[in-house]
Amino acid sequence: MKNTEAQVGTKTVWAGEKEVLVHGATQVPVVVSVAYNYDDMDDWYDVAVGKKQGHIYGRNTNPTVQAFEEKVRILEGAEAATSFSTGMAAISNTLYTFLKPGDRIVSIKDTYGGTNKIFTEFLPNINVEVALCNTGDHDAIEKEVAKGCKILYLETPTNPTVKITDIRRVAQAGKAVGAIVVVDNTFATPINQNPLELGADLVLHSATKFLGGHADALGGVICGPKDLIHSIYHYREINGATLDPWAAYLLLRGMKTLKLRVLQQAKSAMEIAKYLQTQESVESVFYPGLETHTNHEIAKEQMKGFGGMLSFSLKGGMDAVKVLLPKLQYANRAANLGAVETTYGPARTTSHVECTPEERAAMGIPEGLVRISVGIEDTEDLIQDLEQAFEALKKKQVSLSL
């Protein structure tokens, strides 16, 4: 039998775990020890300074956490990975590792709300220049990058408007000026997109979302070259945004079904997007799998699948949203995504709750925009659920017009 590299679905199950299994167990143990004992003082020192593999203190490393990091590293095809207590910790620690006063960063306008707040509020406070371009305007991004920057930061697809940026194209622009190219791959997951293969230097995830998949554990992770990851790890170990071993175990367990979940979510998302396009009360539908999507062709080129995230805007804005969402039976109305349960939420209370209505408008996010994180339920049930909710909305609108 020919010895070939395992495919991605097999890797989600097996990758990164064997090294930490003990006593013949088939599952990674949850190691909650804060400290690790050494009888030999020289061995202890060698581990402490990185000359030998091992663990000394829980804020630095942990066997359960190590297994999680290794699994993501393998799925993203990276040299190294390090993890964090949350996805925002992964983003902020990465940015603060490399940026200092006087540096410049280029990004896009409609990144996740928390990320955008770092760009518009926190980085300017330490005298870092931030240039934000319209998402999808590749010419504008290239022009800003050509002026020079320390970091080029991308999020594709974006949260919540699922806009697409050509990673390969703008990464080349970043490399030309010596920038570190960072891509938030949370929406796509390693199943649908591998930014490192497209020219990015670093790829990060809010592991809370699709990687874990069950809305029961917070975490973040970043992958890339050993030298860059070591610098980020050093910043994180000193500043303390460490991933808890219990959370790491839950994320590991969730990742075993990552491919199965993502395939079902993408299947349903496409059908829901098509259905929404047929509804008179729907103003716009945003999903990269639709041929009507502005950068559908780019998405086809760089993604293996279009994912389980979509959004739509309703005629009537928030008044219509307030009628439609409570009628849904197979949905959580909550500020999360990537879980096995379908989740709906307006941008103003989920992805961009930190922003003012004016700031959301500037990012192209209508107040009536609803984000859908499609779960693993049967597609037909999700469509029927929407049908009855839209029927209730129609009746409400008719009664108001009388």
Image (tube, rainbow, N blue to C red):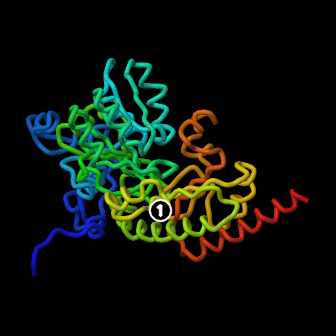
Closest to the observer, 262 or 87: 262
Position above or below: 37 against 240:
below
Above or below, 354 relative to 323: above
Disc 1 element: loop
The quarter in which the N terminus is drawn is: bottom left
- Residue at which label 1 appears: 308
Residue shown at 75%/50% (left/top)? Answer: 319
Residue 165 placement (x, y as % from top left): 38, 48
Disc 1 packing (10 Å; few <14; some 14–19; many ≥20): many
Numbered disc total? 1
Residue 98 makes an appearance in the image: no
Judge by depth and name the residue closer to the eye, 170 or 77.
170
Q: Residue furthest bottom?
A: 1
Name the residue at the right extreme: 402
Q: Position of residue 214 (x, y in %)?
A: 48, 60
> Where residue 299 sits in the image (x, y, percent)?
38, 58
Depth order, front residue of 380/214: 380
Q: Residue at x 21, y 51 (%)?
A: 78
Amino acid type, label 1? Gly
Q: In this rendering, would 284 be left or right of 240?
A: right
Which quadrant holds residue 255? bottom left
Tell me which residue sits at (70%, 60%) in the image.
281
Q: Is residue 53 left or right of residue 161?
A: left
Is any part of residue 53 visible from this angle?
yes
Vertical comparison of 188 with 235: above or below: below
117 or 84: nearer the eye? 117
Quadrant (top left, top right, bottom left, bottom right) of the C terminus: bottom right
Q: From the viewer's perspective, is 187 left or right of 204?
A: right
Q: What residue is rendered at 37% in x and 62% in y?
A: 253
